[in-house]
Image: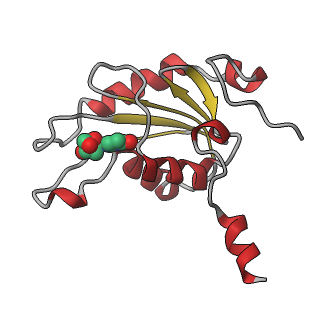
Amino acid sequence: MTEPAAGPAQPFGEASDDVDWEALRLRAVELMERAYAPYSRFRVGVAGLVDDGRVVAGCNVENAAYGVALCAECGMVSELHATGGGRLTAVFCVGSDGQALMPCGRCRQLLWENGGPECLLMTPEGVLPMTAVLPQAFGVDDLRHAEG
Ligand code: THU
């Protein structure tokens, strides 16, 4: 199977066209408005479509011990598992301007684990598959390989 090439913004076939990106963005904005970010004052919200049609979401939650801040994606992935699991198929992360925000490195890894290579992410350059967002990702297959 040929994977979509990394590159400029464009929809990736029917999967992306089928996603109601504006609904996801609006849900992410709702969550961003509930962020607890008194230290950085950088509010983040994220919403993800699950393969059974659910929408899960999260906001960042900071802590006086700065290093233990929870990214918005952590909350979203927690809701994913708490409400029945499944796979993320499309994700929209926003900053306080309500526009697409690229997830940090750790959270790209979370999206990879819970969405895999075909999960779509809205980026400032348009919709991209996770293969473009986290190239040559480390994942469960690497663990199996290392077991020999
Ligand atoms: N943050 C997220 O919630 N997600 C990201 O992908 C990037 C960073 C949060 C963590 C922290 O509360 C604030 O943004 C500033 O780094």
Q: Residue at x 15, y 40 (%)?
A: 40
- The number of callouts visible is 0
Q: Nearer the viewer, residue 87 or 120?
A: 120
- Left or right for 138, reference 63: right
Q: Residue at x 50, y 47 (%)?
A: 108
Up the image or down, 125 lies above or below 121; here it is above
| Outermost residue to the bottom | 148
Q: In terms of image quadrants, where is residue 28?
A: top left
* Residue located at (40% from left, 29% from top): 101
The answer to whether residue 29 is left or right of residue 110 is left
**Where does the image place residue 37, in percent across and percent down from the top left?**
17, 41
Q: Position of residue 64 (x, y in %)?
A: 10, 57
Q: Position of residue 126 (x, y in %)?
A: 56, 19
Quadrant observed for ligand 1 in the rendered image: top left
Between residue 108 and residue 135, name the one nearer to us: 135
For the C terminus, the quadrant is bottom right
Relative height, residue 106 to residue 50 (above, below): below
Residue 38, given in percent of the width and then of the height, sits at 10, 42
Quarter holding the N terminus is top right
Residue closest to the eye, 55 or 112: 112
Work out whether 18 lies above or below 76: above
Taking the image as shown, residue 84 lies to the left or right of residue 140, namely: left
Colouring method of the image: secondary structure
Would you say residue 142 is visible in this rendering?
A: yes
Residue 60 appears in the figure = no
